[in-house]
């Protein structure tokens, strides 16, 4: 669970940065305004990041509980 939480931080923050810097024309139109593609993928990245963070925190609580009981 801890590894998944860490993976979530690395992958989804990197994805959001790359989405913001997108030069392919998918994320931003010719006027520089965000497209539907941008908003959908940003929502997916934020949701996945938050869920990964929650899973990582649950894993951290589990590790701490194991250390206290040992």
Image (cartoon, grey):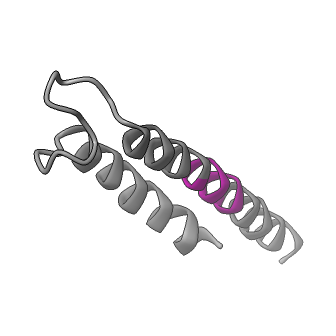
Is 49 part of what is drawn in magenta? yes
Predominant secondary structure in magenta? helix
Residue 61 drawn at (x, y percent)? 77, 59
> Does residue 26 appear to the left or right of 16 in the view shown?
left
Establish if 3 lies above or below 32. Answer: below
> Does residue 53 appear to the left or right of 21 in the view shown?
right
Residue 36 drawn at (x, y percent)? 43, 39
> Does residue 49 appear to the left or right of 27 in the view shown?
right
Q: Residue at x 54, y 51 (%)?
A: 44
Q: Nearer the viewer, residue 61 or 28?
A: 28
Query: How many numbered marks appear?
Result: 0
Is 52 part of what is drawn in magenta? yes
Q: Nearer the viewer, residue 65 or 42?
A: 42
Spot the residue most to the front.
30
Establish if 7 lies above or below 39. Answer: below
Location of the N terminus by quadrant is bottom right
Residue 21 drawn at (x, y percent)? 17, 40
Q: Residue at x 38, y 62 (%)?
A: 11
Which residues fall within the magenta stretch? 48-56
> Does residue 9 appear to the left or right of 33 in the view shown?
right
Q: Residue at x 25, y 48 (%)?
A: 26
Residue 68 drawn at (x, y percent)? 83, 65
């Amino acid at each position: 669970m801890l590894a998944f939480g860490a993976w979530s931080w690395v992958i989804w923050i990197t994805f959001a940065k790359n989405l913001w810097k997108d030069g392919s024309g998918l994320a931003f139109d010719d006027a520089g305004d965000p497209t539907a593609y941008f908003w959908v993928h940003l929502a997916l990245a934020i949701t996945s990041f938050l869920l990964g963070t929650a899973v990582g925190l649950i894993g951290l609580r589990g590790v701490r509980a194991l250390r206290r009981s040992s």
